[in-house]
Amino acid sequence: MNQVVFNFHDVILLMTAMMCMLFSALLVFTNPPKNISNYFLAAFLFTHAFIPLHELTMWGAEFKNTVRENFPQIYFIAGFAYYLDAALLYFYVKSLIFQDFHIRRKDYYHLAPFIIFTLFMILTFYRYPFAQRLEWINNQIFVYSSHYITVDLLCKILRVIYCVACFRLILKYKDLLKATHSNIEKVDVLWLKILVVGFLTVTIMEVFLGVAKFVGMVIGFDFHHLNLSFFEFVGLSGYYFTFVLVCTLVFTSMRYFASFEAIRQKKEPEQTKKPVQEKLLNPEYAEKIDSLMRSDKPYLMADITLDILAEKLAIPARDLSMIINRHFDINFYEFVNNYRIEEAQKILIDPKNKDKTITDVYLEVGFNSKSVFNTFFKKIVGQTPSEYRQLRQAPELAN
C-alpha cells in the first residue's frame, strides 16, 4: 500500500516540476519585451521546478535510490531553489502592482540567503572527500545533522516571511490604487490573494515539519526509528497542494493579468523640491483644479485617472496628487467621486430627469458600480439616492 502511495506521489512531484518548466518556457518565449512581471513569474516557476525534484531526490521511494547510486554529485543541488523562489514570488507580486518597478541595487540583498547557503554547503559538505559525502548521503547523516536542520528551518521561516510580505503588498494595493484611479471596482485581486495564501499555507506546513525536526534534534530524538506516518501525511499534503497551486497560478495569471491595473511606486518624501512645496501651499492651485472640475466635468469619464487629469491641468501627476491631499484632505478616488455625487444630486432633483433610473444616473456621472454609488451618496448626503429623489421631488409635486 505504501509503495503505491509513494509511486503516485512521485508522479505528482514530477508533473509539478514539468509544468513549472513548461509554463516558464512559454512565458519567456511569448512574453512582450516590456512585460517584466511575466519574466519574474517565469523565473519563479523555473526555480520552483527544482523543489519537487529536490524532494524526490531526498525522499522519493525509488528515485532517491537511483540518484544515490548513479548521480550522488547532484544530491543537494536542487535544494538551492528553496533560497530563491520565495524572493522571486515577491518580485512577481511587486512588479505586477507597480508599473515602474525595476531591479535596484538594494534588491540584490535578496540573494544573500542563497549565497549564505552556498557557503554553508561548501564548508560543511562539499569540501569533504567524495567517499565521505557519499556515506553521509546513504546514511542520511548530513540531512539529520544539527547544522543542516537549523539552516533548513531558518530557510522555511524566511519563505513564510516572503509570503507574508506578498500578502501585505496585495492588501495595500487597493488603497494605493485610490490615489490614482476613480473607479477600482473592476480590479480583481482575489485570485492573487488566494494564490499567495495558498503558498503561505504550504510554507507554514514546511515550517511545522522543520520545527518538529529541530525539537527532535534538541531533545536528542532518533528519527530513524520513528514511525513518521503523520509527518509523511503533512509532507504529502503539501506536495499535492503545491501541484494544485502551480496549475492555478499559471491559468489565473494568464486570465487576469491583462486587466490588472498597475500603479506607480511612491517616491521618497524628501525628493519633493522647494518650488513644488510652494505650489502645494498656494490655494490658487486648489481653486484652479476645482474650477476645471466644475467647468469641464472630467469626472464624468468613467475611466479618468490621475494621469489624465494632470494632463488636462498641465501639471505633473505627482504634484496633482500632493495638492489634492494637502488642500482637499482626501485621495484622488474620493476627490473625483465627490464631484460625481454633486452631479448626481442635480440630475436626481431635475424634473426633466424624472424618467431616469438610478442606474442611468450613476452611469451618467461616471460610476461603474451601483453599490459604490449608493455608499458614496449616503456617506456624503446622508440619504440613499432614491430617498433623496423622493424627498426633493415631493414638494414640487405638491405644488
Image (cartoon, rainbow, N blue to C red):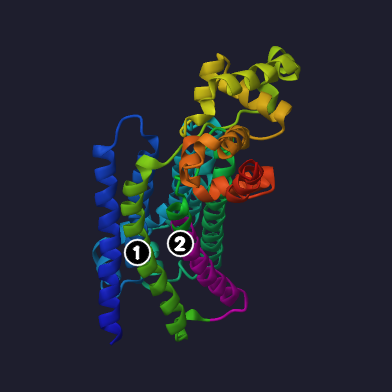
Question: Which mark, by number, is residue 244?
Answer: 1
Residue type for callout 1 = Val
Q: What element carries label 2?
A: helix
Determine crowd level at label 2: few under 14, some 14-19, many 20+ residues with C-alpha closer than 10 A.
Answer: some
Callout 1 secondary element? helix
Could you tell me residue 91's position as x and y percent?
A: 47, 42
Would residue 339 be found to the left or right of residue 19 on screen?
right
Q: How many marks?
A: 2
Crowd class of label 1 (few under 14; some 14 to 19; many from 20; radius 10 Å): some
What label sits on residue 214 in the rendered view?
A: none
Distance between the alpha carbons at the discs numbered 1 and 2: 9 Å
Is 205 in the magenta?
yes
Work out whether residue 345 or residue 145 is closer to the camera in this orientation and state it. 345
Q: Which of marks 1 and 2 is nearer the N terminus?
A: 2
The residue tagged 2 is 198
**Secondary structure that dominates the magenta span:** helix
368 or 143, nearer to the observer:
368
Which residues are drawn in magenta?
195-221
Residue drawn at x 54%, y 59% as measured from the top left: 151
Residue 9 position (above or below residue 52): below
- Left or right, 386 with respect to 192, comes to right
Front-most of 363 and 45?
A: 363
Residue placed furthest toward the front: 399
- Mark 1 and mark 2 residues within 8 Å of each other at the beta carbon: yes
The structure residue drawn at horizontal position 71% and vertical position 14%, both measured from the top left corner, is: 284
| Identity of the residue drawn at 66% across and 49% down | 383
Query: Would residue 28 be visible to someone looking at this image?
Result: yes
x, y percentage for residue 266?
A: 59, 31
Q: Which quadrant of the figure has residue 316?
A: top right
Task: Residue 359: say if magenta.
Answer: no
Quarter of the N terminus within the rendering:
bottom left
| Relative vertical location of residue 342 with respect to residue 53 in this rendering, above or below | above
